[in-house]
Structures are given as structure tokens and as C-alpha cells.
């Protein structure tokens, strides 16, 4: 969005963003600490991917919180560093969201028992390496083109401007928008495929013996439908599809969309923390059931997973 924003809305949106990003930074750091002190989670690919995304979001939220401060510091390289770091963390967040979608596809849609050698190492090289290469090249051509620095945001109905550290070149900005668009389309496709599979699976049930049995099962079906809806809602944040709201407000100022965009995306780290906690709780229940039944768990490069969605799918298949 390149149109000016009213000063009063700028202040409110800034307050919402700072509070949301502060909460997200705290909870994503808590997710990382819990992961580092947990031995069981380190061998779980899904948990490692979740925490990697949490790390990228922590870096993004932390950089955002010091963005306006960086614009007030006199040495120009400070603002350039903050802008480049914020760009890197944003690219990392988008890339890890795409990796989340890819892992979900391999786990629940393609569903095969295949071992990938150095699976997490390869994902980490993509998740952290590609954004690093983009930012490094952008900084490397500083003598020819300045991509990062002080950006003035004009406020409507006033003579005031707010300075932020961000991308200063419009062409480079739209090139990054293409990168996000490709990731958004891919993640949205995976989300729709998974959501469709979940609700189709819920509609398939054993035939009842009569109307009385059907009536007794209605509350159970309602509960399962609510759980499925919450799972899809969690995946919406996990895959970052809420960032797609930027397309609804592109080219003009749409304040309802802008407020919704700031609220949903600034607290993404908090919902990542909730998702990780639910996944860990579900994994503990499955481990306990395995120990009680003395059934060895199957291991593979992809299927050794503890996502909430996977557990729900396995539980439903077991019931049927």
C-alpha cells in the first residue's frame, strides 16, 4: 500500500502492532526455550519446523519493535542494518511458512513412508539460506543501488511524516511481493486441500442402528466439527495465509482490512506457541498410549510427526 494514512489511524495501528509484536516476541522466545530444553522434541521434524518458524517470527517481531528507533539514530548504517535485518526475517518467515506447507503435504496428502537423508539440514539451508542470499546480494550492490534505508511515510491531512527503516526502492519492493505471492498461492492450495480432506473424513461415519443412536451421536459430531474447524483455523496461522489480506488492501487505504491485517499477523507468534503446546500435548498422549499398549511406534523420515492435525487424522481413522 503506497497511499498516505491518516495520523490517528497510524498511531492506533502502531500501538496495536507494538503490543501484538511484543506478545509474539515473548511467546516465540518461550517456544524456542521449551524446545531447547526438551529432548523428545529434537527428533520430531514437525516440532523442529514449528520452532524454526517461531525463530523467524521472533526475529521479525524483535526487528519491528526497534524499527522506528533505528530511524532516529544518526549513523545511517544503523537504519540500513535494521531494514536489511527486517527484510531478512520477513523472507525467513515466508520461507518457513512454505516449508510448513510442504511438510504438511508430504505428511498428510502424499502420505508415504520415505526416509530423507539430512531432512532438517536441507530444510534449514532453504529456510535460512535463500533469504540470506537475497539480502546479501541486495547489500552487495550498495555502490550501484541503495535498497535499504530511511523511508518516509506521509500522513494525510497533516504536514507530518513518520520515518521507518525499510526498503526504499519500489521496484525491489514489488519483486519481493512476487516472492510472497508465490508462497501464498502454494500455501493456500495446501490449506484448501487439507481442509477439504478433514471435512470429507468427518462426513464419513459408520451407519447408525436407528434414529436414537443417530441422535446420541449428534453432540459427538458437533464436537468433532468444532475441533476440525479449530484445526483449520490453526493451520491458517501456521501457513501464514492471513498475510493474504495485503492483497485486499493493495492500491488504496482500506482501514478495516488494515486493522485486521495488523491484529492477525502481529499475534501470529502467540498462536504458534499455542499450536506447539497442543502438538506437544497430543504427542505425550500418543506416547503414553504406545507405552500402555506396548506397540512400537513406526519411524521414518517424514512420518515421525506430532502435529495436532496428524493426531486428529490418526484418531479418526482408528475410530472407523
Image: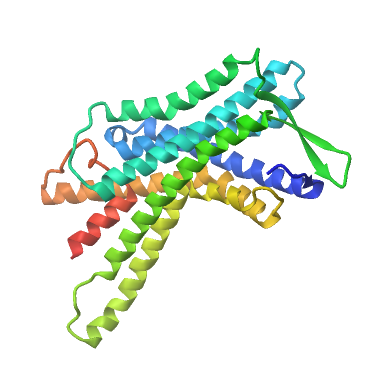
Q: Is residue 267 above or below residue 215?
A: above
Q: Relative to residue 189, is residue 22 drawn left or right? A: right
- Residue 181 makes an appearance in the image: yes
Q: Relative to residue 15, is residue 237 drawn left or right? A: left
Of 224 and 80, nearer the camera is 80
Measuring from the top left, give residue 23's x and y in whole percent. Answer: 57, 42
Q: What is the quadrant of the C terminus in the image?
A: bottom left
Q: Which quadrant of the figure has residue 77?
A: top right
* Residue positioned 28% across, 77% down in the render: 217
Q: Relative to residue 125, is residue 159 drawn left or right? A: right
Colour scheme of the rendered structure: rainbow
Q: What is the quadrant of the N terminus in the image?
A: top right
Task: In the displayed orientation, state which residue is furthest to the bottom.
Answer: 211
* Residue positioned 78% across, 35% down in the render: 162
Measuring from the top left, give residue 297's x and y in whole percent. Answer: 15, 43
Measuring from the top left, give residue 14's x and y in whole percent. Answer: 71, 43
- Residue 306 makes an appearance in the image: no
* Residue positioned 64% across, 48% down in the render: 250
Of 127 and 173, nearer the camera is 173
Of 197 and 49, nearer the camera is 197
Count of numbered marks? 0
* Residue positioned 33% across, 66% down in the render: 224
Measuring from the top left, give residue 222's x and y in whole percent. Answer: 36, 72
Amino acid at each position: 500500500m503506497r497511499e498516505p494514512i491518516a495520523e490517528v489511524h497510524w498511531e492506533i495501528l502502531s500501538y496495536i502492532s507494538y503490543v501484538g509484536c511484543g506478545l509474539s516476541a515473548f511467546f516465540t522466545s518461550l517456544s524456542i526455550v521449551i524446545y531447547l530444553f526438551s529432548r523428545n522434541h529434537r527428533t520430531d521434524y514437525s516440532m523442529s519446523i514449528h520452532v524454526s518458524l517461531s525463530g523467524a517470527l521472533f526475529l521479525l517481531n524483535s526487528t519491528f519493535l526497534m524499527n522506528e528507533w533505528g530511524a532516529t539514530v544518526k549513523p545511517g548504517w544503523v537504519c540500513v542494518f535494521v531494514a536489511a535485518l527486517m527484510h531478512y526475517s520477513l523472507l525467513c518467515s515466508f520461507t518457513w511458512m512454505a516449508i510448513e506447507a510442504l511438510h504438511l503435504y508430504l505428511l498428510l496428502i502424499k502420505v508415504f513412508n520415505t526416509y530423507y537423508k539430512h531432512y532438517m539440514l536441507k530444510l534449514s539451508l532453504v529456510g535460512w539460506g535463500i533469504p540470506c542470499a537475497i539480502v546479501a546480494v541486495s547489500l552487495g550492490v550498495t555502490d550501484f543501488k541503495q535498497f535499504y534505508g530511511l523511508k518516509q511515510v506521509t500522513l494525510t491531512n497533516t504536514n507530518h511524516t513518520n520515518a521507518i527503516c525499510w526498503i526504499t526502492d519500489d521496484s525491489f519492493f514489488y519483486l519481493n511481493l512476487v516472492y510472497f505471492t508465490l508462497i501464498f498461492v502454494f500455501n493456500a492450495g495446501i490449506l484448501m486441500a487439507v481442509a477439504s480432506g478433514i471435512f470429507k473424513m468427518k462426513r464419513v461415519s459408520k451407519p447408525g442402528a436407528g434414529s436414537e443412536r443417530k441422535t446420541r451421536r449428534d453432540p459427538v459430531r458437533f464436537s468433532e466439527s468444532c475441533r476440525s474447524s479449530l484445526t483449520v483455523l490453526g493451520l491458517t496461522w501456521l501457513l501464514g495465509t492471513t498475510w493474504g489480506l495485503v492483497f485486499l488492501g493493495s492500491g488504496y487505504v482500506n482501514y478495516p482490512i488494515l486493522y485486521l491485517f495488523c491484529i492477525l499477523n502481529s499475534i501470529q507468534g502467540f498462536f504458534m506457541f499455542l499450536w506447539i503446546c497442543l502438538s506437544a500435548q497430543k504427542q505425550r498422549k500418543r506416547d503414553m498410549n504406545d507405552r500402555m499398549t506396548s506397540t512400537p511406534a513406526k519411524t521414518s523420515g517424514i512420518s515421525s510427526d506430532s502435529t495436532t492435525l496428524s493426531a486428529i487424522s490418526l484418531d479418526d481413522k482408528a475410530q472407523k
